[in-house]
Image (spheres, grey):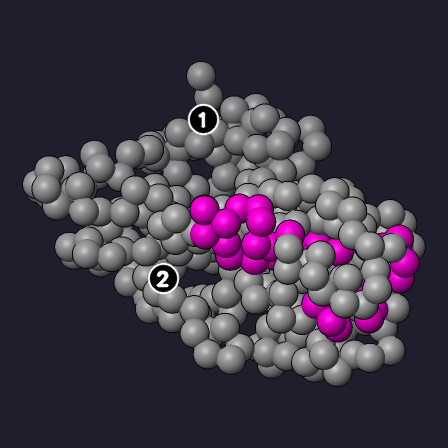
């Protein structure tokens, strides 16, 4: 069997891999390799028919990709006890690998092996917490080039960001994609905590008109750039502000992608037109699902003399032990 690869420009590597995977021709048993200063070789099982590329080449001596971090660490001489303390999961965001190391020994060695596992990645970041008024990430480089600026692609939506400056939650991928499915063309949406465009971009790409508000300067800069990157600047009105200052907004849908969103329900309800839909995020202890988030939303609505119909409740991901990141969808009359 011939070992085929397609040549693509380095900046397009991550997006092209996603397209090749969707086409069913990406060969993840081989590593991505550098062809020259401008191009990389992406391994494929057959010549693509739907994905754009520069040229098809045949690799004479391809590098086989290991698929098991534990095996790689064992080859380095790690003991079973040390391997048990190594991370069992991580996230690839564009060309950056995000890892929470906790008490893992020798994280630099783990970082090097993760780069070997993910040939398209260039940097490994140790992921700490999120802090400060602007929810800034605590990260540090443990392996690779140290370049934290990247473009991450999900379901066709491109997110350009600098992971040193802004947060990105890989576990929210399904929710980001879902928001592009629930909106209607020309629907007016108020995204109160837009960030870099996590929910704004899928909705705008689906044809909605989004008022996107973000107060973090770094996130706002990425939000504006991402509107251009995804060819939807005419569908996004971006404001660097506190969403509570947006008194004139009227919307058919309000998105509240913030753990303490319930504190902003007065603003959301003032903007939401009768019959509109609200998506309220929250972190909720297991033993208070779904009473707490639902009661908060209903109480706020009743204070405004409005009725609530709960449409859906969803767990997005585990936030911490016994605590869930959840979303409540409701129609408010």
Membership of 237 in magenta stretch: no
Which range of residues does the magenta coloring cover?
A: 265-294
Q: What residue appears at the point 36 percent right and 62 percent down from the top-left corner?
A: 127
Location of residue 27 with respect to 88 vertically, above or below? above
161 left or right, relative to 100: right
Residue with the mark numbered 1 = 3
Which quadrant is the C terminus positioned in?
bottom right
Q: What residue appears at the point 29 percent right and 60 percent down from the top-left corner?
A: 143
Task: Work out whether mark 2 precedes mark 1 in sequence or the reverse, and give the earlier one.
Answer: 1
- Dot 2 alpha-carbon crowd within 10 angstroms: few under 14, some 14 to 19, many 20 or more: many
> Secondary structure beneath disc 2?
strand
Q: What residue appears at the point 62 percent right and 71 percent down from the top-left corner?
A: 263
Membership of 279 in magenta stretch: yes
Image x and y of residue 311, in percent: 74, 42
- Dot 1 alpha-carbon crowd within 10 angstroms: few under 14, some 14 to 19, many 20 or more: some
- Asked whether the beta carbons under mark 2 and mark 1 sit within 8 Å of each other, the answer is no
Image x and y of residue 158, in percent: 65, 55
Question: Rounded to the nearest whole Å, what is the CA distance between mark 2 and mark 1?
Answer: 36 Å
41 left or right, relative to 296: left
Image x and y of residue 148, in percent: 45, 66
* Residue 161 visible within the image: no
Location of residue 69 with respect to 27 vertically, above or below? below
Image x and y of residue 153, in percent: 60, 50
28 left or right, relative to 50: left
Q: What residue appears at the point 47 percent right and 74 percent down from the top-left corner?
A: 136
Location of residue 143 with respect to 88 vertically, above or below? below
- Quadrant housing residue 16: top right
> Secondary structure beneath disc 1?
loop
User: Is 140 in front, or is 266?
Assistant: 266
Residue with the mark numbered 2 = 127
2 or 1: mark nearer the eye = 2
- Quadrant housing residue 53: top right
């Amino acid at each position: 069997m011939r070992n085929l690869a397609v040549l693509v420009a380095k900046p397009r590597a991550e997006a092209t891999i996603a397209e090749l995977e969707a086409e069913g021709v990406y060969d993840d048993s081989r590593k991505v390799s550098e062809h020259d200063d401008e191009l990389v070789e992406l391994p494929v099982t057959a010549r693509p028919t739907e994905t754009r590329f520069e040229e098809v080449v045949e690799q004479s001596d391809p590098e086989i990709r290991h698929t098991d971090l534990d095996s790689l660490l064992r080859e380095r001489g790690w003991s079973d006890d040390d391997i048990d303390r190594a991370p069992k999961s991580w996230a690839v965001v564009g060309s950056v690998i995000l890892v929470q190391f906790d008490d893992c020994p020798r994280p630099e060695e783990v970082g090097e092996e993760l780069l070997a596992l993910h040939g398209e990645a260039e940097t490994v970041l140790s992921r700490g917490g999120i802090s400060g008024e602007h929810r800034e990430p605590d990260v540090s480089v443990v392996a690779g080039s140290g370049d934290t600026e990247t473009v991450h692609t999900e379901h066709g939506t491109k997110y350009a960001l600098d992971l040193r400056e802004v947060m990105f939650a890989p576990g929210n991928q399904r929710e980001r994609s879902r928001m592009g499915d629930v909106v209607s063309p020309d629907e007016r949406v108020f995204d109160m905590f837009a960030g870099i465009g996590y929910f704004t971009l899928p909705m705008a790409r689906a044809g909605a008109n989004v008022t996107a508000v973000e107060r973090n300067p770094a996130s706002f800069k990425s939000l504006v750039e991402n509107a251009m990157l995804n060819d939807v600047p005419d569908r996004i009105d971006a404001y660097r502000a506190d969403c509570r200052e947006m008194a004139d907004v009227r919307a058919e849908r309000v998105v509240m992608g913030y753990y303490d969103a319930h504190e902003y329900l007065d603003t959301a309800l003032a903007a939401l037109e009768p019959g509109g839909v609200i998506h309220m995020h929250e972190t909720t202890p297991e033993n208070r699902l779904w009473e707490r988030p639902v009661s908060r939303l209903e109480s706020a609505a009743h204070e405004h003399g409005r009725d609530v119909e709960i449409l859906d409740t969803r767990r997005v991901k585990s936030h911490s032990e016994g605590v869930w990141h959840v979303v409540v969808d409701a129609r408010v009359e």
